[in-house]
Amino acid sequence: MDVLSDVIAIMRSGRPRSARVAWHGPWGQRFPSVPGSAGFQVVLQGSCWLIPPTGDPVALGVGDVVFFPHGHGYGLADSPAASLAEPACDPMEDTELFVSDLVGRSGPVTVTLCGGYQLDPARAHPLLRDLPEVIHLPARVGRHPELRAAVDLLGAEVDRPGLGADTLVLALLDMLLVYILRAWFADRPAGSQAAGWSAALADPAVNAALHAIHQDPAQPWTVQTLADRARLSRAAFSKRFTALAGQPPLTYLTWWRLAVAARMLRESDAQLGEVATRVGYTSEFAFANAFKREYGLAPGRYRRQGGEAASASAAT
């Protein structure tokens, strides 16, 4: 798997949700903060205003995508001065994978497609932490056609579900998340290349080392062997990796190994010794000590408590 696919697989939990809503003016809704989630809004028809917690309202038009990677609250309305009602539709509160709703009965209509992804804050990848509170991807002719196609397909399937709709919507929600992140990396503001994970993934040397770590975390990697993959001297590689990724290469290697181990403990019945070996530890004892330092629980207890609850408990 490539680095971005790995990151999404590790941090995702539960099933995503989505909703297509037709808003008849006048309207305004507050979307509350949902810790441990990420959400998006897409304007399918009409126009509206994004009301952020701080700063000026932002005008949104057809095709605009707004992504909230940290689950912070916001508002949507038909005018920047509209009052915001309590949630009438929140995909993270619905038990269904997707819903279609109507708010109001008359007035100009705006149609939005919203969705949410459940994330485990205890294992949030630094790539996600680097993202801003709000990512606005305006619709532009010829820009990100794959993202636009995914939006169109998802909107149509939620509006008119057919046979196999659950499978299609799940796949399209995953696709949409990847395309949103791809678009952000491609459109990141000038000057953001200096540091951060978008810059790390765009840097050939650092990306080569990251790919090696993700492809085979069990390898006995050293700074030198990773520098060899990056085709840099040991000192130059260590300095560049730390500057872009925000931590030294072996610190990230340890974090990633334990994140992979936590996923194995949650999703498989592999013995602890096998988990330890597959993430690069030569003894179960060394693995257990490292895991407890990172997650606050021994691996066996983490598994018995179900991973998700254990992570939440350790994070508080």
Image (spheres, helix red, strand yellow):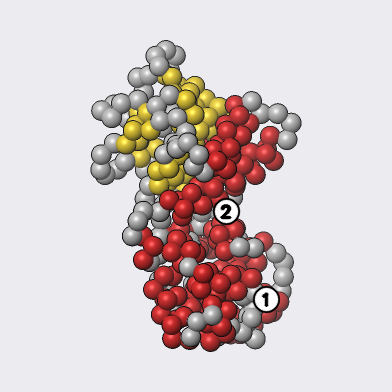
Pinpoint residue 191: horizontal percent, then vertical percent: 33, 60
Read off the residue under disc 1: 278
Give residue 13's mark: 2
* Residue pictured at 50% horizontal, 33% vertical: 113
Q: Assess disc 2: are there few (<14), some (14-19) or many (≥20) residues with their C-alpha within 10 Å of its C-alpha.
A: some
Pinpoint residue 230: horizontal percent, then vertical percent: 54, 77
> Quick one: 6 or 201, which is closer to the camera?
201
Alpha-carbon distance for marks 1 and 2? 22 Å
Give the secondary structure at mark 1.
helix
| Dot 1 or dot 2, earlier in sequence | 2
Residue type pointed to by label 1: Arg
Q: From the viewer's perspective, is residue 133 above or below residue 250? A: above
Give the secondary structure at mark 2.
loop
- The image quadrant of residue 31 is top left
> Quick one: 125 or 121, which is closer to the camera?
125
Specify whether 160 is left or right of 92: right
* Residue pictured at 32% horizontal, 30% vertical: 84
- The image quadrant of residue 289 is bottom right
* Residue pictured at 33% horizontal, 33% vertical: 59
* Residue pictured at 65% horizontal, 44% vertical: 171
Residue type pointed to by label 2: Ser
Pinpoint residue 6: horizontal percent, then vertical percent: 59, 62
Q: Assess disc 1: are there few (<14), some (14-19) or many (≥20) residues with their C-alpha within 10 Å of its C-alpha.
A: some
